Each structure stands twice: as structure tokens, then as C-alpha cells.
């Protein structure tokens, strides 16, 4: 079974080929045109996908050492994401499947992140076998879900405002770091002191409103953003410059400690012994390290995809299509799937 996956929901154009469940290629092109603007410009993102989609898909098929006529199924992100960006990959994929007379499978991008620990060649640990708690943290979403062995899942916590990736990117921008600031903060923090300044950890046992904590698995990062902004406004440029790494490490600590505490508390409360982290923020080295330590301490196993599969990629799209097919989903020759922008809209369609 050869599956072509296509991903264009934000600023990565990606194509991947899965042959009998194994990743044979995963070509990802990250758009650089947004750097000047400090964030993703939707119209530019769509145009870049349009410019690159043919060559990326060609490269993925060539690298997998097959021809397009050997494809059995095509899968693509149908949402959530920037609607114009999603449309480029979705329309291309459906057009290609129609031309080849093979089935098409629409994939929910966030679900693909949730199931990314199942990507065959990314397993430093085996994929979770029983139920697991998934922390899915990206630029647009922060979700805690309990995933059952039959791969159904319930979202039991989400961000009330900014996503964790957004918190990295926006506080990084305040520090003068380029977009996306998440990986830059990660790198800078290696030589910084996380205890330099204690930024707020909202809705946790450390927050001033800790009574909100019990049984509450939601997140809130907008207070952190305000706190970083007001704190920076009180500092001199010289202090900010000389302590950039310490400030980055303090911001990272505030975000990571919340993510770890809530995830472990959620797994404990649901009596689940396995945890996974996915989405772009799961590439963060401090999150990986702290979550591993917390899981070891709590007697839980941690399942993480390789870093290349944390950020947006098409291998996760093809993998979710493959998982669905292996669990009895019928692939249809249906080529009129519409894109959706929000996670909630995608779940209503499912
Ligand atoms: O999953 P993803 O590639 O795209 C979305 O679906 O949003 O996630 C992108 C987000 C960005 O906010 C980026 O700053 C963040 O993931 N990110 C990181 C790291 N690598 C990517 N955040 C912290 N540390 C990293 N190493
Ligand atoms: Zn994503």
C-alpha cells in the first residue's frame, strides 16, 4: 500500500510517501517569506504553497523510488489551518487522486499531530499500545486529550487564549527574536538561567489562583505575554541585551513547567500510564527533558515522535490515513471535500 500525504495548512509545504506503513520520503519546505513580517501572512503562505506544491510532491514520489502510477491512496490536510493555504494542498491532492482514479482521504491536521508517535521510522520508543494522554502543542493549538486504544479520543483541556507556540513566538518577538521564535528561544535558553525571573504559570498549582487548578486541564498563556511585556518595559536596553539568554530561559521555563504539570496531572487523574507530546512545541528540548523526568518519576512512559515529525510534515498526514485504513476505514473515490479553518469545524465533519 503506497500512500501519498500532502500538508499545506500553514507555512510548511510538505509531501511524503508511506509504503506499507514505513516512511519512504518526507519532503518539507519551510517558507522564509514571513520573517520580515514577524508572523505568517496568510496570502503569502497560499502563494508560496501554489508555487512549490508540484515540485515538492514530485520530489516526495521520486525520493520514495516509486512512480505516481504506483500510488494507491492520496491523503491531504483538510483543516484546521489558514483556509487559503489548506485549499492549495487539498485541491491539488483531490485533483491528483481524481486524475489517477484512486481514493482520497481528508485528514485533520491536529489529529495527525496527536497520532504522530505512530510514525514508523520516528520511534525511539514503541508507539503507545493502550490508552495515552496526548499533549498537542503547536502554533495555533494547545490540547490535552485522552486517546483510547481504539484511537478515539476526548479533548479534556485546551488553551483559553494563546497557544503555547504562540506564547513562544510572541514573547520572542518582544525580545527582538526572529519568527518563529520558539526554536530560537530553545537554543538561547541552553546558556540561560531559568530562575532569572519567575514569570506567571497560569492555572497551575503555582498560580495565584491555584484554586482554579484542581480538575482544570485548560491552559492560558495570554497573562504570560502581558507579564513579559510589562517586565521588559521596566528594564533598560542594556539589561535586556546582557540577559537575553536568561530571559529566554525564564520564559521557556514558564511555558514548559505548565505543560508538564498539567499533562502529568491529567494522566494521573485518568489513571493512564502513557503520555505523548506532539506538535511543533514538542520539538522543544526543555519540554522533552522535563516531560521525560516527570514521566519517569510518575512511572509513566513517554512517547515522542522524532523532532522532524514534531513540526508540520506530510508523513504524519499519510500515517493517520494509513492508521484509519488499517482499522477498517473505507477509502472513497470522493473528490469534493471542502476545507475547514477551525478544529471544532473539523470534528463536526468527522
Ligand atoms: O506544529 P507546527 O509546526 O505548526 C502549527 O501547526 O502551528 O508548530 C509551530 C510552532 C511555532 O509556534 C514554533 O515557534 C513552535 O512550534 N516551535 C517550537 C520549537 N520548534 C517549533 N517552540 C519551542 N521550541 C522549539 N524547539
Ligand atoms: Zn501543526
Image (spheres, helix red, strand yellow):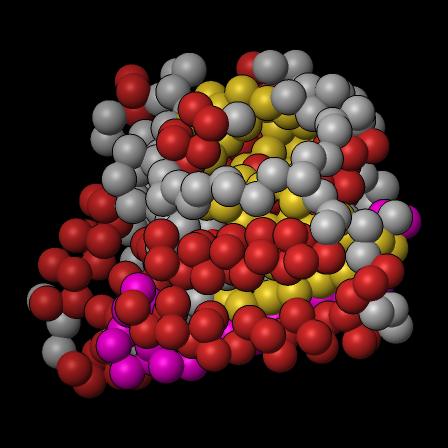
What are the residue bounds of the magenta stretch?
A: 20-42
Which residue occupies 59% across, 34% down? 134
**Does the image show residue 252?**
no
Instruction: Please state the total of marks drawn on the protein image.
Output: 0
Give the quarter of the image for residue 37: bottom left
Position above or below: 128 against 250: above
Q: Nearer the viewer, residue 85 or 221?
A: 85
Q: Is residue 290 left or right of residue 183?
A: right
Position above or below: 86 against 186: above
Position above or below: 238 against 97: below
Residue 224: in magenta span = no
Which residue occupies 79% across, 26% down? 327
Can you give x and y, in whole percent of width and height, for residue 107 in the image? Answer: 58, 42
Q: Is residue 48 left or right of residue 335?
A: left
Give the quarter of the image for residue 182: bottom left
**Does the image show residue 81?**
yes
Q: Is residue 31 left or right of residue 277?
A: left
Can you give x and y, in whole percent of width and height, for residue 255 in the image? Answer: 40, 49
Q: Nearer the viewer, residue 277 or 245?
A: 277
Which residue occupies 36% across, 58% down? 84
Residue 32: in magenta span = yes
Can you give x and y, in whole percent of width and height, for residue 128 in the image? Answer: 78, 33
Q: Nearer the viewer, residue 103 or 23?
A: 103
Position above or below: 158 against 33: above
Which residue occupies 81% across, 50% down? 72
Amino acid at each position: 500500500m503506497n500512500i501519498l500525504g500532502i500538508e499545506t495548512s500553514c507555512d510548511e509545504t510538505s509531501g511524503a510517501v508511506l509504503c506499507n506503513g514505513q516512511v519512504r520520503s518526507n519532503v518539507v519546505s519551510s517558507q522564509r517569506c514571513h520573517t520580515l513580517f514577524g508572523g505568517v501572512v496568510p496570502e503569502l503562505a497560499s502563494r508560496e504553497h501554489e508555487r512549490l506544491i508540484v515540485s515538492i510532491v514530485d520530489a516526495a514520489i521520486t525520493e520514495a523510488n516509486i512512480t505516481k502510477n504506483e500510488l494507491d491512496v492520496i491523503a491531504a490536510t483538510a483543516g484546521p489551518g489558514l483556509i487559503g493555504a489548506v485549499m492549495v494542498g487539498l485541491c491539488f491532492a483531490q485533483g491528483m487522486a481524481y486524475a489517477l482514479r484512486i481514493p482520497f482521504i481528508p485528514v485533520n491536521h491536529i489529529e495527525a499531530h496527536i497520532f504522530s508517535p505512530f510514525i514508523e521510522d520516528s520511534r525511539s520508543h514503541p508507539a503507545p499500545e493502550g490508552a495515552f494522554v496526548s499533549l498537542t502543542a503547536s502554533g495555533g493549538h494547545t490540547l490535552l486529550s485522552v486517546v483510547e486504544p481504539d484511537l478515539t479520543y476526548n479533548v479534556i483541556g485546551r488553551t483559553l487564549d494563546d497557544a503555547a507556540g504562540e506564547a513562544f513566538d510572541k514573547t520572542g518577538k518582544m525580545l527582538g527574536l526572529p519568527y518563529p521564535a520558539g526554536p530560537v528561544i530553545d537554543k538561547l535558553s541552553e546558556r540561560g538561567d531559568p530562575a532569572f525571573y519567575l514569570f506567571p504559570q497560569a492555572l497551575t498549582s503555582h498560580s495565584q489562583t491555584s484554586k482554579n487548578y484542581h480538575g482544570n486541564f485548560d491552559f492560558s498563556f495570554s497573562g504570560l505575554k502581558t507579564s513579559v511585556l510589562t517586565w521588559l518595559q521596566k528594564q533598560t536596553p542594556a539589561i535586556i541585551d546582557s540577559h537575553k539568554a536568561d530571559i529566554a530561559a525564564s520564559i521557556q521555563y514558564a511555558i514548559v513547567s505548565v505543560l508538564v504539570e498539567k499533562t502529568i496531572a491529567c494522566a494521573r487523574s485518568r489513571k493512564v500510564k502513557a503520555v505523548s507530546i506532539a506538535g511543533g512545541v514538542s520539538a522543544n528540548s526543555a519540554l522533552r527533558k522535563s516531560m521525560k523526568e516527570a514521566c519517569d518519576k510518575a512511572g509513566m512512559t513517554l512517547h515522542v515522535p522524532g523532532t522532524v515529525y514534531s513540526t508540520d510534515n506530510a508523513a504524519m498526514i499519510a500515517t493517520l490515513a494509513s492508521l484509519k485504513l488499517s482499522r477498517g476505514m473505507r477509502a472513497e473515490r470522493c473528490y469534493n471535500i471542502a476545507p475547514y479553518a477551525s478544529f471544532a469545524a473539523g470534528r463536526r465533519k468527522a
